[in-house]
Image: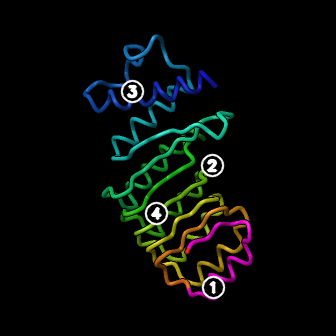
Amino acid sequence: MGTRRYGLVAALMLATAAGCGKTADDPSALMDGPLDADQAVIASVVVALEQLGGRVNWEETEGGAGDPEMEVSFSGKPIGDPELRAIIQQLKKHEQFRYLDLSHTAVTDEGLKGLKELPNLRTLLLSHTAVTDAALKDLTQVDSLDLSDTGVTDEGVRELKTHKELKWLRLDNTKVTAAALDDIKATLSDCKITP
């Protein structure tokens, strides 16, 4: 665990250094020694994601057991489907990237199809995007999903009823009717659904 933590701190240091004009070509200049292969992958992905305009944070898992989870946010950034493809290519390089915030961006249903390539993605925030029902069938791996202020309707909610792994679902300010909301709440009784 300590090595993993050290590697993530190193990755974040490298990402910060990249923003200061330094490069990740010589990570030993920022640490006591070279990165192992896993740390090097994380560091290169963090640097690439930040160059694309993202923010990368990490947090320990509950109780400190297991690998920390990397949180990647592009919220409010001027990204659309072409940029999302580049982001996905980076996220595919390491399984610790499980949280992606695309809220307030220009991503569409078409761009979200690529998220199928991220089997470890667990949390996806899509509020205030152009996402519609069409994107939902491809998001089976996520267990936390924010669809507030999107074009999702009752049809999309019917699709989500089959996603038994959902633990948290936000549907504020969508076109979902009260009847469909009651239906999904009854079907996914272990899922916290708002409104």
Tell me which numbered mark, 3 or 4, is placed earlier along the sequence: 3
Which of the 4 image quarters holds residue 168?
A: bottom right
Measured Cα–Cα span from mark 4 to mark 2: 18 Å
Sort mark 4 into few (<14), some (14-19) or many (20+) by Cα contacts within 10 Å: some
Q: Which residue is mark 1?
A: 180
Query: Residue 163 or 52: which is nearer the viewer?
Result: 163
Eye-nearest disc, 1 or 4: 1
Eye-nearest disc, 1 or 2: 1
Q: Secondary structure at mark 3?
A: helix
Residue 173, position in %: x, y?
46, 78
In this rendering, position of residue 12 left or right of residue 76: right
Three-letter amino acid code at the position of disc 4: Gly
Measured Cα–Cα span from mark 1 to mark 2: 29 Å
Tell me which numbered mark, 4 or 2, is placed earlier along the sequence: 4
Eye-nearest disc, 1 or 3: 1
Q: Which residue is mark 4?
A: 111
Which of the 4 image quarters holds residue 162?
A: bottom right
Q: Is residue 139 magenta?
A: no
Start-end of magenta stretch: 177-194
In this rendering, position of residue 141 left or right of residue 189: left
- The structure residue drawn at horizontal position 38% and vertical position 56%, both measured from the top left corner, is 75
Three-letter amino acid code at the position of disc 2: Asn
Question: From the viewer's perspective, is residue 158 above or below residue 53?
Answer: below
Q: Which residue is mark 3?
A: 14
Residue 45, position in %: x, y?
46, 37
Query: Residues at badges 1 and 2 in contact (C-beta under 8 Å)?
Result: no
Q: Which residue is mark 2?
A: 120
Instruction: Locate the N terminus and report the quarter of the image it occupies.
Output: top right
Question: From the viewer's perspective, is residue 102 above or below residue 55?
Answer: below
Question: From the viewer's perspective, is residue 5 above or below residue 155?
Answer: above
